[in-house]
Amino acid sequence: MGRASPTAYHDRVAENPIVRALADRVRTSGSGPLLTWYRPADGARTELSVRTFANWVDKTANLLDTLGIEGTVAGPVSVEAPGHWMSLVWPVAAWQRGCGYRAGAPDAGTELVVVGPANPLPHLPALTLACSLHPLGLGLRGLPDGVLDYTGEALAEPDAHWATGVDAGSLAWSDAERSLTHAATALVPPVAGRALVRPTDAWTSLAGAVLGPILGGGSAVVVEGDVGADELVRIVTAERVDDPVA
């Protein structure tokens, strides 16, 4: 399937609603914050504007096109690190490509597997990409044969925006507890302010950190891992969180 030109994007009527909303947000407030990610255990902090997040989505969707992926992308990385910004990019990129995303182990219909740095297993039943989960997205070296470094592959792709049309009723997301259509991915509470997200399961983390803010025009502060009460208060204050309930 060939790539649609960026100018043709808004002529399409069947793209995933999150993909459409993200593109609209880039146009209206691309320089504004979308996601600020913390890992207090090692002092890591990464801030992604709407445009930066969308650029990673574009590059990843273009990579899926280059690799010829049109079916299901399985992401064990979403279970391993549900709140990391790299994990959060993947479902939106899969939807932009018109694919379904499975948060967890691959199944018989999987065309691509996305893993974290602790699990770059060879001999998986599909092509495998490994995410470094580095705060700045640095790549991985010394991967097994057949496992590609996500960062290196994605950064080689253009960030031109295009979107593949989807059937609103087709499967977009699945995990151990739920299956959601492309239309249902937008049925999450919109976030208009700046919310704190403490990652739990893959879907709740994605909905709170990315989908709600995209739909509502807000942003999220994601704090991964163990953090003391005083440190959490410091982060909430420094980041001007409006809703400290995650």
Image: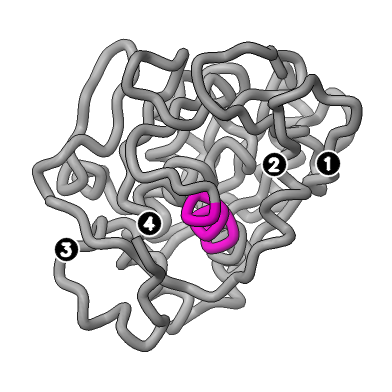
Q: CA distance from mark 4 to mark 3?
A: 11 Å
Between the residue at mark 3 and the residue at mark 2, the CA separation in whole angstroms equals 28 Å
For the point 32% across and 78% down, the residue is 9
**Whole-number angstrom distance, CA of label 4 to CA of label 2:** 17 Å
Mark 2 burial class by Cα count in 10 Å: few <14, some 14-19, many 20+: many
Q: Find the residue positioned furthest to the bottom.
A: 7
Q: Are marks 1 and 3 in contact (CB under 8 Å)?
A: no
Give how far across and how far down residue 221 sits, in percent.
Answer: 60, 45
Residue picked out by circle 3: 14
Residue assigned mark 1: 139
Q: Which residues are magenta?
A: 57-66
Q: Amino acid at mark 3?
A: Ala
First in sequence, mark 3 or 2: give its number.
3
Check the image and tell me how it is coloured.
Answer: one colour
User: From the viewer's perspective, is residue 93 above or below residue 76?
Assistant: below
The residue under label 4 is 96
Decide which of tag 2 and tag 1 comes sooner along the chain.
Answer: 1
Q: Check disc 4 and report its element: helix, strand or loop.
A: helix
Mark 4, residues whose alpha carbon is within 10 Å: few (<14), some, or many (≥20)? many
Label 4 is placed on what type of residue? Gln
Q: Are marks 1 and 4 in contact (CB under 8 Å)?
A: no
Residue 167 against residue 126 in the figure, above or below: below
- Say whether marks 2 and 1 touch (CB < 8 Å): yes
Horizontal side of 232 relative to 44 (left or right) equals: left
**Cα–Cα gap, marks 1 and 3:** 34 Å
Q: Residue at x 59, y 60 (%)?
A: 59
* Mark 2–mark 1 distance (CA, rounded to whole Å): 7 Å
Instruction: Point out residue 50 in the picture as x, y percentages from the top left corner.
Output: 55, 66
The image quarter containing residue 203 is: top left
Q: Who comes first in sequence, dot 1 or dot 4?
A: 4
Q: Which residue is mark 2?
A: 150
